[in-house]
Amino acid sequence: MKKTWYAYPYLVWMTIFIVVPLFLLLFYTFTATTEEGIRFTLQHIKRVCEPIYLMVLLRSILLALICTVVCLLIGYPVALILANKEYSQNKVLALLFVIPMWINFLVRTYAWMSLLGKNGLIDMVMDFLRLPPVQLLYTDHAVVLGMVYNFLPFMVLPIYSVLAKMDKSIIEAAEDLGADYITVLKRIIIPLSLPGVISGITMVFMPAVTTFIISRLLGGGQYILIGNLIEQQFIVVGDWNFGSAISFVLTVIILISMGIMRKYDREYEGGAIW
Amino acid sequence: MVEEPIIRLVNVSKNYDGTEALKDINLCIRKNEFLTLLGPSGCGKTTTLRIIAGFERPDSGAVFFEGKDITNLPPYKRKVNTVFQRYALFPHMNVAENIAFGLKIKKLDKKTIERKVAEVLELVNLKGFEKRSVDSLSGGQQQRVAIARALVNEPEVLLLDEPLGALDLKLRKSMQIELKRIQKMLGITFVYVTHDQEEALTMSDTIVVMKDGTIQQIGTPEMIYNEPKNAFVADFIGESNIIPGRMLKDNLVYFAGHEFECVDSGFERNEEVDVVIRPEDIKLVPVGEGMLQGEVESVTFKGVHYEMIVRSEGINWMIHSTLMEPVGSRIGLRILPHDIHIMKKAAVK
Ligand SMILES: Nc1ncnc2c1ncn2[C@@H]1O[C@H](COP(=O)(O)OP(=O)(O)O)[C@@H](O)[C@H]1O
Ligand SMILES: [Mg+2]
């Protein structure tokens, strides 16, 4: 593509908000300030590799993976239904899905707190059914639930847009050749929608692995994920070097997983472009 | 002897929110025939095909296959296969996988599938293309793969929706011949959709001329061409001069300011009619010899013949002739009685 002058504001924007922060991140990660001045060091990275921090990192990745899988299991059928001509003709279903997204993220998460909390709606229902109350708030379940609820649209939308763009005559051709719906789904729809699935996975996994608000609100004050750890270092402890080092490690992990995804995606490129 | 038609449409109607795509269609398709649905764009050809394939349900009426009602049978249970207008090949599979799709669903063993794929590729002149990806193929080759993918299932009926529409003229001509050869060789019933009258005339055993969701005429290419049932069919099948006229009595018609002998009868006295005359049926003669005379307004060379517009009696006559008369010259026109086709006026809507 030809570079033209009207791309300059974008370049300036990119420089200020992406390139400069990245250099700052690298700077803080690999330097230490001593009496003699600023010098290169790997001590912060080494500290990230201590078991206590690694455990937090692993737990964050595990929860984000669970969240991604659940989002995929719920999101794919939802995208299928939304992309189906008969259902999408009445807009109610799409609206039901979209309206919650218009509400502020924090408000939605607070709403879950009151649903899950003591004397919340769920406790009331359990009480009504003469069942013992369940402690959901401040558990892993609540955190995963909050993540799934907030990030589900990021899974649904890319899959939906691939499905909606899919050439209907390809599906008809498969039916014409004797494939029932399950076969069409397995052999045609799912393989052709993989690019959407992959970008959905990426778009859910990344915010899920870095979240700190959902884990704080639904996991409670003691609940530490990698996002909370980073936030703590910058805001509470004030150790910008260590905070940067954790961010750096996390960024590397995300970049690697994105690279793997992209490679996988490219193998299916024939399905993405036609 | 009455032979059971392989497909029968009975009083089939179809509405798409408001548009009447098909109005009360009745159609019999005989086994092993090459039947063409012919008509201008939007007349309901694709809809008819989709109802036979099972992708659309008729709002009313029924579809029979070998005498059994299949109106509500889903597409994957029907013994017909379709070649789609835009090929609809599976983009994530190579040529062989595309063709094998139907066979794998039937759970044939690997050896048989391989053999059948190779056979059908040979049939459509694509030997050795097994491993090619479909988007590396030209339009004509993709078309052949689409045909092979349908044929390999040995359907009783093959439905083709303007399969040659996207190809250039030369390729289209050779594919027409190839399709006809395949149809003869395999003895499969073809239901073929086109808006190209020439294609329909060269390939078909039976032509169904459609307009605005109704069938105008069903017949052999010769019948449709020589005895069009109404002015629309006459005009659509080849070019025609269509002139308003009046039937004076049996075998005598008045048009263009003269009385002409003709061979049609059975009309009311003084009934208003359409007179249809083919451009090649008007003979150029010296002035004074024919019934009409006029002045040549334009001449176009068309390869085999000249197309001339001659103005006479306030009408522009289109004439095809291998002889050329220069623009501006005065000539006589002769029309023989059996070349005058009288049609009932189309019902005014
Ligand atoms: N899915 C559809 N929704 C609404 N209208 C349709 C649909 N398919 C066809 N039609 C309408 O039905 C009529 C017949 O269409 P079609 O069978 O595709 O014609 P043809 O194939 O002869 O060009 C047209 O007026 C077309 O606009
Ligand atoms: Mg059509």
Image (spheres, grey):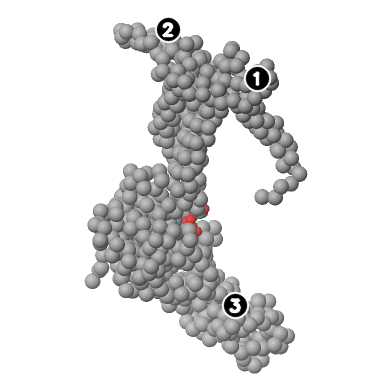
Question: Helix or strand or loop: what does disc 2 sit on?
Answer: loop
Q: Which residue is mark 1?
A: A33
- Indicate whether B271 appears above or below A250: below
Residue A76 spot, x, y in % from top left: 42, 35
Instruction: Look at 52% across and 80% down and name the residue there.
Output: B340
Q: Visible in this render: residue B307?
A: yes
Looking at the picture, do discs 1 and 3 lie on one chain?
Answer: no
Q: Which residue is mark 3?
A: B255
Label 2 chain ID? A
**Of labels 1 and 3, the one closer to you:** 1
Q: Amino acid at mark 3?
A: Phe
Q: Quick one: quadrant of the N terminus of chain B?
A: bottom left
- From the viewer's perspective, tell me whether residue A2 is left or right of residue B101: right
In the rendered structure, find residue A118 and report the number of the disc placed on it.
2
Q: CA distance from mark 2 to mark 3?
A: 96 Å
- Indicate whether B16 appears above or below B299: above
Instruction: Look at 65% across and 25% down and name the residue there.
Output: A39
Q: CA distance from mark 1 to mark 3?
A: 108 Å
The mark that comes first in sequence, 1 or 2, is: 1
Residue B15 spot, x, y in % from top left: 45, 49
Which one is nearer the viewer's eye here, B81 or B312?
Answer: B81
Which one is nearer the viewer's eye here, B170 or B293?
Answer: B170
Looking at the picture, do discs 2 and 3 lie on one chain?
Answer: no
Label 1 chain ID? A
Q: Amino acid at mark 2?
A: Lys
Instruction: Look at 68% across and 19% down and name the residue there.
Output: A36
Residue B85 spot, x, y in % from top left: 46, 59
In the rendered structure, find residue B301 and report the number of the disc placed on it.
none
Label 3 chain ID? B
